[in-house]
Image: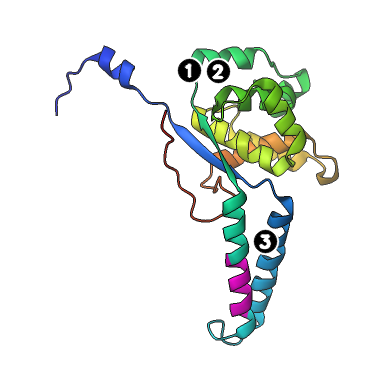
Amino acid sequence: MTDDFDIDEFIAGYEPQVVPVKVCPKGSLVAEHAALDAALNAAAQEAGDVMRDPEVSRLKAEVAAIERRIEEESRTFYFRAVPRRRWQDLKRQHPPTEQQRREDRLDVNLETFVVPAIALASYKPKLELEQANRLAETLPDGEIQKLFAAVIEVQGEILVPKSVLAAAIDRVDPNARSSTTAALAAYLAAGSSADHDGASPGTSTTTPDD
């Protein structure tokens, strides 16, 4: 290997990072999975022999079955890093409020930035802004957080030091948390090793073909 290479060829052949996010459109399945998983954990704690307990075995089978159904119903959104100039242009279109700048040290207004960012970084399917808005109106906050977290991850973005974000979230009354707080939490999650694919196991992270 040599340190000398064709920079034009390198630029032409550069492939932006792609991050997949699985979303299940059947909320009833997700709720059923959560209930079964909680029941399984409770049964496992009460069982003397987890490997031989019939109730644990039954619940394990039911959880596996519901996870297969979730996998079948889920759809994968792919997000791809966009050029720095386009990303910076979008940020300039959504400046933070004085309160956000002063208290949370944000450089964007997350109340207005999240949905356009999802649209901009969407890859497959490619979302128009109107579609991203409808998606945000349809999906629960947790799913939008997953999508936005993937956008932040794929951009390698640092909107604000995470220690500051954690402190900002802690200051908010849990009964009065806004979509801004949800977006802050999503940004924190983007920096962790959290699974973008939610309840569905065995997710592939293969980059889709162009």
Give yes or no for residue 182 being in the magenta stretch.
Answer: no
Judging by the rendered image, the residue that carries numbered circle 2 is 87
Q: In which quadrant of the rendered image does the C terminus lie?
A: top left
Quadrant for residue 179, please give it: top right
Q: Is the magenta stretch mostly helix, strand or loop?
A: helix
Quadrant for residue 23, please give it: top right
Tell me the amino acid under the disc marked 3. Answer: His
Highlighted magenta segment, given as a residue range:
56-64
Task: Estimate the x, y position of residue 171 in percent, counting from the top left.
Answer: 77, 40
Label 2: how many residues lie within 10 Å, few (<14), some (14-19) or many (20+)?
some
Task: Estimate the x, y position of residue 7 in percent, counting from the top left.
Answer: 26, 14
Task: State the separation of the CA atoms marked 2 and 3.
Answer: 37 Å
Q: In this view, does 154 lie above or below 101?
A: below
Task: State the separation of the CA atoms marked 3 and 1.
Answer: 39 Å
Q: Which residue is drawn at 68% across and 45% down?
A: 25
Judging by the rendered image, the residue that carries numbered circle 3 is 33
Task: Estimate the x, y position of residue 182 in percent, counting from the top left.
Answer: 72, 38
Q: Earlier in the sequence, mark 2 or mark 3?
A: 3
Tell me the amino acid under the disc marked 2. Answer: Trp
Quadrant for residue 96, please give it: top right
Give yes or no for residue 58 being in the magenta stretch.
Answer: yes
